[in-house]
Image (cartoon, rainbow, N blue to C red):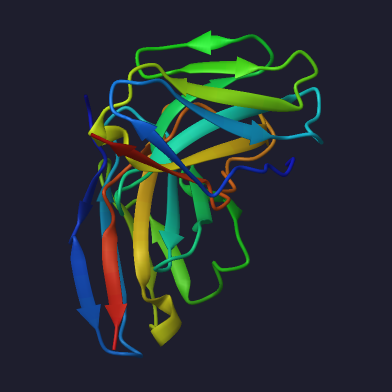
């Protein structure tokens, strides 16, 4: 699976959009981009995933660049409860069951 | 929303003892997983399980580890002879189909003394 690079930490004011970048320059054509988050020491929580089109759900939006070498997770109106570690994971669908977690981005939302 | 349930939330054991960590996956899910996270470190994949057999396992998952689905609802992780380095938070996860989003439990904190 392709390696990802994320900034170790970011801050965001409550109510503002949080934009979390991820670089995956070695991504292959059949690899998906997944985002999970981990609040404190709880179990990871799925947020969103995509292949090449932008995706949106009730939690977030995922913007993938045209060359697919990077993506951005957008939390449109961050709340204090969004403070967590956010993981960008690239994996091949139908190839392996496992998720390989990196160190992620620690997002701190402040009042 | 349905949840993956793990018990106990904390488990303390002596080195060399056997422990069983229990999980109740979401009821209609077919794929089951164990991950662990040593304090301050990354979340690590241990094993995946489908159709009553292991489908994939990591190097961490050695002969001291085993998994079982003893009935239609429980999924267990057994560590035969615990070591100090097995101290970690253990997460169970499940999904309905392979490669769909995983639902994780809240974890069991295992402390080996």
Residue B41 in the figure: left or right of residue B87: right
Q: Is residue B61 left or right of residue A3?
A: left
Residue B10, percent from left and from top:
19, 67
Q: Quadrant of residue A107?
A: top left
Quadrant in which the N terminus of chain B is drawn: top left
Say which residue appears at 29% left-offset and 49% top-offset. Answer: A42
- Give the residue drawn at x 33%, y 90%: B15
Q: Is residue B83 visible?
A: no
Is the C terminus of chain B in the top left, top right, bottom left or bottom right quadrant? bottom left
Can you say whether B103 is above or below B45 in the image? above
**Number of numbered discs visible in the structure rendering:** 0
Looking at the image, residue B110 lies above or below residue B35: below
In x, y percent, where is residue A33?
Answer: 62, 28
Examine the rendering and report whether any part of residue B110 can be seen.
yes
Q: Is residue B99 above or below residue B54?
A: above
Residue B77 locus on image (x, y percent): 36, 62
Q: Residue at x 61, y 42 (%)?
A: A6
Residue A17 image position (x, y, % from top left): 41, 20
Q: Nearer the viewer, residue B87 or A83?
A: A83
> In this rendering, is residue A51 above or below B35?
above
Q: Nearer the viewer, residue A32 or A7?
A: A7
């Amino acid at each position: 699976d392709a390696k990802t690079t994320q900034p170790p930490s970011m801050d965001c004011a409550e109510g503002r959009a949080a934009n979390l970048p991820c670089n995956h320059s070695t991504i292959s054509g059949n690899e998906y981009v997944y985002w999970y988050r981990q609040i404190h020491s709880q179990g990871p929580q799925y947020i969103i995933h995509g292949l090449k089109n932008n995706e949106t759900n009730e939690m977030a939006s995922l913007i993938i660049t045209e060359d697919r070498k990077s993506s951005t997770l957008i939390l449109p109106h961050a709340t204090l409860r969004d403070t967590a570690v956010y993981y960008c994971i690239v994996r091949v669908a139908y190839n392996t069951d496992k998720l390989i977690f990196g160190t992620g981005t620690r997002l701190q939302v402040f009042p | 929303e349905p949840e993956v349930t793990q018990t106990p939330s904390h488990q303390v054991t002596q080195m060399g003892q056997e422990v069983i960590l229990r999980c109740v996956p979401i009821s209609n899910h077919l794929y089951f997983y164990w991950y662990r996270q040593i304090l301050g470190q990354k979340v690590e994949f241990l094993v995946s399980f489908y159709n009553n057999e292991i489908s994939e396992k990591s190097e961490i998952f050695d002969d001291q580890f085993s998994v079982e689905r003893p009935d239609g609802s429980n999924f267990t992780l057994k560590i035969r002879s615990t070591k100090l380095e097995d101290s970690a938070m253990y997460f169970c996860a499940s999904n309905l189909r392979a490669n769909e989003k995983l639902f994780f439990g809240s974890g069991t904190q295992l402390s080996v003394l």
